[in-house]
Image (spheres, rainbow, N blue to C red):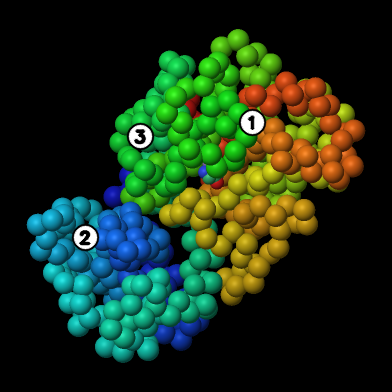
């Protein structure tokens, strides 16, 4: 079987989802799993709809991301049913009739009005685990989101099936195309907006389809972690470029960051190279049984070692970590689970019955505290930034002497550095999904 062909892997994927649903329903004491795809949301006092975002659970079951007012129904022991909303509508393009490699696995009913779904859903809503947002309610089918069911499904969603990994590999290929185009646009002097357009054009996706808003930051803007302003004029001179941008493949995300120095900015390039080398080592630490919290703490020490080498701090990495100095330069988590959502669910789950593993004290933005296990895909995204707001806190906390402020002044105009890849945890060595795609591009 081709391990990169979603079509060939889909049947097994569906089998895994059905087995997970069997157990989740048994735990919750329900007979049916009912998953609405979601509905359109409208802007207040307006008839304009927000970009439609499919229920993430729905898109794990079938590769459909633009199918509002549809329903998936699964009853243990039976083929899943898909209630497929294809309205008569001459104002908009309606979904194509279901076709492709996934349709043979469902009993499909086409409906023309949202309410036509009702007679096709199970008889008794009280026997259903209905997973969705409140707005999806239809008649008696009001999402009840039973905790026992959700805890189980969310916990196992961290373990990607080969089908999901194949789609995530496709999302890497698409995003790397965009990253290559974006770097070329930067080298040609484009504005943030121009770089963003070059990215979208190369990927073939626009803002509504991408898994998150592109972060395209020139110079100091790289110090704003989620900088999404897209300046229309390129600053002069251009010194640095940070791009954090992904792509979607049938609803599965990639989330990739690269940082570049403009020609002639050799010292900043050397700092990028040091972070890049450290990031590769962190990626290699994604191994079965390794605690992601530890990976995050180790990343702090590694990054502070780099800042010490570059003369930005003059205390040991351990001292920088203990005093909070390191959190001023690396103020986010090392990464997160990724899959159907860019920040995938259950990063803090203690087990399939729920419960929560707290973050280590002093690390409020870490998004994942689980122990790594085969099938998990995580991002590894260390960063170093020069953020005045946080550096002022270092001064106020009495740690000003730990920092060489002349070196901060030197690097501040570059904003910061982040390098981000996706890594699949396996039984053996880490499988970096991102690097080989850049190497082949
Ligand atoms: N692009 C958002 C993140 O890296 O988590
Ligand atoms: Mn990112
Ligand atoms: Mn990320």
Q: Please identify the quarter of the rendering in which residue 429 is found.
A: top right
Q: Residue at x 20, y 77 (%)?
A: 115
Report the disc number at residue 200. 3
- At which x and y percent is residue 46? 29, 61
**Residue 374 left/right relative to 128:** right
In this rendered view, identify the residue nearer to me: 37 or 424: 37
Q: Which residue is drawn at 21% across and 60% down?
A: 103
In this rendered view, identify the residue nearer to me: 362 or 220: 220
In this rendered view, identify the residue nearer to me: 336 or 436: 336
Q: Give the CA separation, mark 3 to mark 2.
A: 30 Å
Q: Give the CA separation, mark 3 to mark 1.
A: 23 Å
Give above or below for 170 relative to 336: above
Mark sitting earlier along the chain (3/2): 2
Residue contact at pointers 3 and 1, CB within 8 angstroms: no
Of the 4 image quadrants, the one containing the C terminus is top left
For residue 238, say whether it is visible. Answer: yes
Q: Residue at x 45, y 70 (%)?
A: 20
Give above or below for 82 relative to 65: below
Secondary structure, mark 1, is strand
Report the disc number at residue 416. 1
Secondary structure, mark 3, is helix
Residue indicated by mark 2: 103
Q: Which residue is drawn at 13% across and 69% down?
A: 112
For residue 31, say whether it is visible. Answer: no
Give above or below for 235 relative to 116: above
Q: Please identify the quarter of the rendering in which residue 318 is found.
A: top right
**Residue 315 left/right relative to 277:** right
């Amino acid at each position: 079987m081709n391990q990169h062909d979603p079509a060939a892997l889909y049947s097994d994927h569906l089998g895994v989802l059905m087995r997970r649903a069997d157990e989740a329903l048994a735990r919750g004491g329900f007979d049916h799993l009912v998953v609405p795809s979601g509905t359109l949301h409208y802007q207040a006092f307006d008839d304009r709809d927000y970009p439609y975002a499919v229920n993430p659970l729905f898109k794990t079951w079938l590769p459909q991301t633009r199918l509002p007012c549809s329903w998936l129904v699964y009853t243990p022991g039976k083929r899943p049913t898909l209630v497929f909303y294809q309205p008569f509508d001459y104002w908009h393009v309606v979904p194509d009739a279901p076709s492709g490699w996934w349709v043979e696995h469902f009993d499909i009913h086409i409906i023309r009005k949202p309410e036509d779904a009702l007679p096709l859903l199970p008889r008794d809503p009280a026997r259903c685990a209905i997973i969705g947002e409140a707005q999806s309610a239809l008649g008696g089918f009001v999402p009840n989101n039973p905790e026992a069911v959700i805890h189980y499904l969310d916990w196992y969603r961290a373990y990607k099936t080969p089908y999901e990994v194949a789609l995530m590999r496709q999302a890497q290929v698409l995003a790397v195309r965009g990253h290559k185009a974006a770097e070329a646009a930067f080298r040609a002097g484009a504005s943030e907006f121009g770089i963003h357009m070059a990215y979208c054009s190369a990927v073939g996706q626009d803002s509504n389809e991408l898994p998150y808003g592109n972060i395209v930051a020139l110079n100091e803007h790289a110090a704003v972690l989620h900088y999404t302003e897209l300046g229309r004029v390129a600053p002069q001179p251009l010194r640095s470029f940070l791009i954090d941008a992904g792509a979607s493949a049938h609803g599965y995300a990639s989330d990739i960051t690269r940082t570049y120095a403009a020609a002639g900015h050799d010292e900043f390039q050397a700092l990028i190279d040091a972070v890049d080398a450290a990031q590769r080592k962190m990626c290699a630490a994604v191994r079965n049984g390794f605690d992601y919290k530890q990976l995050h703490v180790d990343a702090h020490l590694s990054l502070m070692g780099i800042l010490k080498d570059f003369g930005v701090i003059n205390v040991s990495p351990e001292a920088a970590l203990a005093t909070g100095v390191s959190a001023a330069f690396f103020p986010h988590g090392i990464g997160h689970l990724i899959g159907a959502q860019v920040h995938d669910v259950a990063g803090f789950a203690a087990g399939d019955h729920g419960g929560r593993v707290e973050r280590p004290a002093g690390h409020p933005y870490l998004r994942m505290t689980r122990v790594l296990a085969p099938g998990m895909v995580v991002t590894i995204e260390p960063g170093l930034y020069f953020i005045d707001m946080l550096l002022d806190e270092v001064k106020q906390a009495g740690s000003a002497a730990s920092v060489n402020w002349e070196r901060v002044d030197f690097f501040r105009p570059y904003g910061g550095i982040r390098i981000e890849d996706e890594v699949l945890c396996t039984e053996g060595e880490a499988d970096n999904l991102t690097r080989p795609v850049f190497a082949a591009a």
